[in-house]
Image: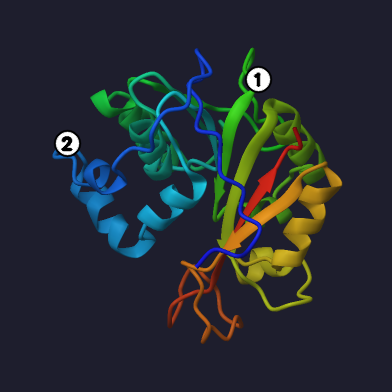
Amino acid sequence: MVALGVAVCAGFNAGSGRAQAAPDYAALLAAPDRSDADREADKRRDPIPFLKFADVRPGMKVLDMGAGGGYSTELMARAVAPNGMVWGQYPADGPARALDALAARMKTPAMKNAAADLQPFDDPIPSGVSNLDLITFLFYYHDTTYMNVDRAAMDNKMFAALKPGGFLVLADHAAKEGADVSVGKSLHRIDEAIVRKELEAAGFKFVAEADFWRVPGDTKDFSSLRPPSPVDGFVLKMQKPK
């Protein structure tokens, strides 16, 4: 269920400005050239509700923050095909395993309209890129709280790179209400209120939240990296005002 106040994403062709229909996300996931590892990740990530909530459409220009090995970047690339573009952001000094996986993925046919963006989190926008339709930021914002990242600069640059009316859709592992940002390192979680406050300080306006990754029984006192039970996840849709 999505909270009241949802604004419908424009879904425009990046080149022509013409609205395009949303793709069949289930068919995208069923594509025969997807890897077994990604299909296994689907069972844990359950991406279709997110793709619908983000309203990713052909022709869109998308930045996928914290791309890691590129699982979500590839989903975006498939959804914006054939005439959109996706940049998968991950710092060049990140873990070699993730960087190698991202580089290998970029060589596959599914990524012909995608590119690796090996920029730091607080300077994440590829050179010459502007007027993005959408930025996605999945389960990585909490990591920036203990990394050498200027989050205010990061948020401001994401805001500037979006077109007026563009969206940032962010998901993360939920911490207890009022929890300090220090739990980002110890529990790999973050308080939703902190994220909203920081994004709003950059100029973003709250549009909607979704509960498809919510887990009401999560006690939020254990690390999301090694969970003994399912982890509660919040999803926010924020917009750059038109």
> SS class of the residue under badge 2?
loop
The quadrant of the rendering that contains the C terminus is: top right
How far is mark 1 from mark 2, CA to CA?
A: 31 Å
First along the sequence among labels 1 and 2 = 2
Q: Is residue 129 visible?
A: yes
Question: Which of these two is toward me, 144 or 9?
Answer: 9
Residue behind mark 1: 130
Q: Nearer the viewer, mark 1 or mark 2?
A: 1
The residue most toward the right is 201
User: Could you tell whether 64 is left or right of 209 in the image?
Assistant: left
Q: Residue at x 79, y 42 (%)?
A: 150
Q: Position of residue 96 (x, y in %)?
A: 45, 39
Which color scheme does this rendered protein use? rainbow
Q: Which residue: 37% across, 35% down?
A: 79
**Of 181 and 87, which appears nearest the observer?**
87
Q: Is residue 125 left or right of residue 195?
A: left
The residue labelled by disc 2 is 33
Q: In the image shown, does 241 or 65 lie closer to the viewer?
A: 241
Quadrant of the image occupied by residue 126: top right
Disc assigned to residue 214: none
Side (left or right) of 235 relative to 68: right
**For the point 63% across and 43% down, which residue is it?**
168
- Kind of residue at disc 2: Asp
Question: Residue 93: x, y in percent?
Answer: 57, 35
- Position of residue 114 relative to residue 225, above or below, is above
Residue 233: x %, y % from top left: 54, 67
- Front one among 95 and 22: 22
Can residue 47 be seen?
no
Residue 45, above or below 105: below
Q: Residues within 10 Å of mark 2 (few under 14, many from 20)?
A: few
